[in-house]
Amino acid sequence: MYQNVIFDYGNTLAVYRERDIARHYVEEADVSLFASGFFDRLYCDRLDDGTLSLEEWCALAAKRLPPRLHAAMRAACEGWYRTLPGVPGMGAVVARLRAEGRGIYLLSNISREFAAHAAELPGLAGFHGMVMSGPLGIVKPSLAIYRHLLDTYGLDPATCVFVDDRAENIEGARAAGIAGYLFDGNASRLMDFLFS
């Protein structure tokens, strides 16, 4: 039984679907345009590694979106992460870990802005520690980010398991001596893995 469980965020603890996020800000007719112009991987990767600021992201996205969507874009820039619903069943997994006194940690590729507000999100309340890529300038699956988490919180990798929805991130954890669980969206199977 692993004493410390490290979670990814997007599509592990919270559902991350760009079109669903877009629906919080624009009408259905503009969802595809908004999602592709706002969530371009070029922007998201640079947000995750801390080389693009919120202001720069908004300016770049504005060039790809028509002026009628600029107000929605600014609103999304400042709070898109608050629209993410929890992955069904994951709240119960985290609650049971907490009840058993196990360590609960977050390791996520996410922007500096998200990192600044992460403690406000209900799904992350009560975590023992969080490491996010944006403020560090290091992204998964770099070995350095896993080692940073272990060193920061004094964790023995042999006591840890990392839960993520991407195989390359699981491999990065294993390179750091951390067991991995490739999450497929099924919280019930994860519950069995962690508590059986």
Image (cartoon, rainbow, N blue to C red):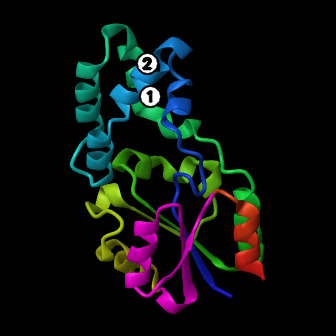
Is 164 situated above or below 123?
A: below
In screen coordinates, is 158 left or right of 61?
right
Q: Position of residue 58 (x, y in %)?
A: 29, 28
Q: Residue at x 55, y 83 (%)?
A: 160
**Is residue 38 placed above or below 148 in the rendered structure?**
above
Which residue lies under the disc numbered 2? 72
| Horizontal and vertical percent position of residue 168 | 40, 67
Residue 122 horizontal/vertical position (percent) = 64, 50
Q: Is residue 74 magenta?
A: no
Q: Which residue appears at 59% of the width and 46% of the height? A: 15
User: Would you say residue 27 is visible in this rendering?
Assistant: no
Residue 18 visible in the snapshot: yes
Q: Which residue is at the front of the view, 12 or 128?
A: 12
Say which quarter of the image contains residue 78.
Answer: top left
**Residue drawn at the location 64% of the way across and 42% of the way down:** 85
**Is 183 colored magenta in this rendering?**
yes
Other residues around mark 1 within 10 Å, as few (<14) / some (14–19) / many (≥20): many
Instruction: Tell me the residue that label 1 is attached to.
Output: 76
Which quadrant is the N terminus positioned in?
bottom right
Tell whether 181 sits left or right of 87: left
The answer for how far apart the CA atoms under marks 2 and 1 are is: 6 Å
Neighbours of disc 2 within 10 Å: few (<14), some (14-19), many (20+) = some
Q: Quadrant of the C terminus?
A: bottom right
User: What residue span does the magenta drawing correspond to?
Assistant: 155-184
Q: Quadrant of residue 93?
A: bottom right
Q: Amino acid at mark 2?
A: Ala
Marks 2 and 1 in Cβ contact (< 8 Å): yes
The three-letter amino acid code for the residue at tag 1 is Ala
Q: Secondary structure at mark 1?
A: helix
SS for callout 2: helix
Give whichever of 131, 1 is nearer the camera: 1
Query: Would you place residue 31 above or below residue 2 in this image?
Result: above
